[in-house]
Image (tube, rainbow, N blue to C red):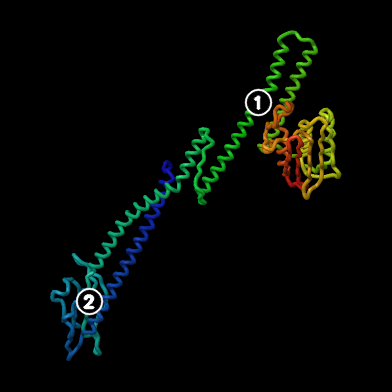
Amino acid sequence: MRNLTIRTKMTMWYSFMLLILLSIFSFLVYAMMSKMMYSGEENLIKAHAAQAVSSVEVENGSVKFTEPHELVISGTYITVYDKRGQIIFGGDGIYPDIDIKKPSEEKLRVIKTKDNTWMIYDRPVHEENGLVAWVRASRSLMPVGKTMENLRDILFLTIPLFLIIASGGGMFLASRALAPIDRITKTARAIGHGDLSRRLNMPNVQDEVGRLAMTFDEMLDRLEKSFKKERQFTSDASHELRTPIAVIRAIAEETLTGERNGDEYREALEIILKEAAKMGKMVSQLLLLTRGDEGRYRLEMEKIDLKIVVEDVAGEMQSMAEQYGIDLCIDAGKSVVVKGDQTLLTRLFMNLIENAVKYNKRGGWVKVTLDEVKNFARIIVEDSGIGIPEEDLPHVFDRFYRVDRSRSTDGTGLGLSIVNWIVKIHSGKIDIMSHPDKGTRFIVYLPLNSSRDGS
C-alpha cells in the first residue's frame, strides 16, 4: 500500500466504500421487496379464501359451494372440506399434490415441494350451529421466487458494473484533481535542478488544490527574489572586498621588492591600515545585517531622549562636516522620548548625517530637525547635496547599491541598508525625497510608545 499512488489509494478507498454501500442498499432492497411481495401474496390468499367462504352455504344439513366454476381465482386454488375433513369441492386435478393433513385450525403455512413452494391458508366456515366446513386456499410462490431471483441476478450484475464505472470515474476525477499536484512535483523537481523561474501558472480556481498552487507560485516568487538578492549580495560583497584586498596586496608586494626608508614604510603601512579598517567596517556591517536578517540581534530597549542622541551625534560629526566644508545645524526644540536601542539609534543618525555630508557640495549645508507628529517622533535629515535621480530612489536601501560609484571610494554601500533595518526593527518607517542638484531629504518616523521587547 505504501508504494501506491494517491489516486490509486483514493480510487480503491472510494470503490471499497461504494461496494459496502451498494451491498447494504441491495440487501435492504431485496429484503424489503421480498417482504412486500410475500405480504402481498398473504393478503391476496386471505382475500380469496374469504371470497370462497362467502360462497359456502348449508341447506338441510348439506354443505354446498355455490360457485364451483370459480375454484381457481387468479392463481389461487380453492378446496372445500366438510367438518370431518372430507373434500366436498376441488382437489380433482386442481388442488396440487401436496402431502398435508386435513385442515384443523385457521393457519397460514408455506409448504415446499420438490419443484415448487406453496402458500396454504385454511379457514373455517361457521354457521349458527358451529363449524360446518373448511376452506383451503393454495397459491404457488413460484412467480414470487422467480421475481426475487431475477432481482437478485440484477443486483449481482449491477453492483460490479457500478463498481467498474465508479472506479473508472473515480480514477479520472482523481487524476484531474491531482493533476496540479503532479505539476507541483515536476516544478519542484525542476527547481531542485536550479531552475527557479518555473511556475505552475494554473487557472485561478478557489479550491484546495487551486489555493495550494497559488501559494506555491507565491513561494517560488519569494524564493527566486531571495536567491537573486543572495547571489547579488554575494557578488557585491566579493567585489567590494576584492578592492581593498588588492590594494593591500599591491602595496605589500611593492614595499617588499626593494629597500625602503622609514617614511615609505610608514606610508605603506598607513595605506594597508586604511584598507584593513575599511574591510573591518564592511565585515562588521555585514555581520550586523546578517544577524538582523536571521533575527539573532537582541535589542536593548530603553527610554531614550532623541534630542540628546541627535545632538551628541551631530557633535561627533561636526569635524567631518568642517572637513568637507559643510554647515551642519540641529533644530530640536524639545525633548522627544521613544523606546529603543540606543546603540542602533545612534548608528541610524550617524549614517544619515554621514551620508548627507559625503554626498553634498562644498559650502553646502545639512539640517537635522526633530519634532513630534501625532504618535511618532519625526527626524528629518536634509541636505543641499547632489541629489539622487528618480530611477535610483527605489534602490537606495539595497545593499551595496550606489547611485554613482565614482562619487566616493570611502563608503561601503551598506549604510542606508542598515538605516532601513534599524527603522524597521523599531517599528518605524522611512521616506526619501530627492532631486538631482537640489538635495535629498530623509524622513524617519519612530513610534513614541513602542511595545517591542527586543527579542
Q: Secondary structure at mark 1?
A: helix
Residue type, mark 1 in image: His
The residue sitting at the left extreme is 92
For the point 71% across and 41% down, the residue is: 424
Any part of residue 221 in sight: yes
Using residue 34 as the reference point, say whether residue 322 is left or right of it: right
Using residue 56 as the reference point, say whether residue 351 is left or right of it: right
The residue sitting at the top extreme is 259
- Near-viewer residue (98 or 89): 89
Q: Secondary structure at mark 2?
A: strand
- Near-viewer residue (409 or 406): 406
Q: Quadrant of residue 270?
A: top right
Q: For the C terminus, which image quadrant? A: top right
The percent coordinates of residue 288 (x first, y second) are 70, 33
For the point 33% across and 56% down, the residue is: 159
Disc 2 residue crowd, few under 14, some 14–19, many 20+, Cα 10 Å: many
Q: CA distance from mark 2 to mark 1?
A: 111 Å
Q: For the N terminus, which image quadrant? A: top left
For the point 17% across and 86% down, the residue is: 64
> Against 23, is 443 above or below?
above
Disc 1 residue crowd, few under 14, some 14–19, many 20+, Cα 10 Å: few
Any part of residue 296 in sight: no
Residue designated by label 1: 239
Residue type, mark 2 in image: Ala
Residue designated by label 2: 137
The percent coordinates of residue 115 (x first, y second) are 19, 65
Q: Give the number of the mark in front: 2 or 1.
A: 1
The percent coordinates of residue 441 (x first, y second) are 76, 39
- Near-viewer residue (392 or 346): 392
> Against 159, is 64 above or below?
below
Mark 2 or 1 closer to N-term? 2
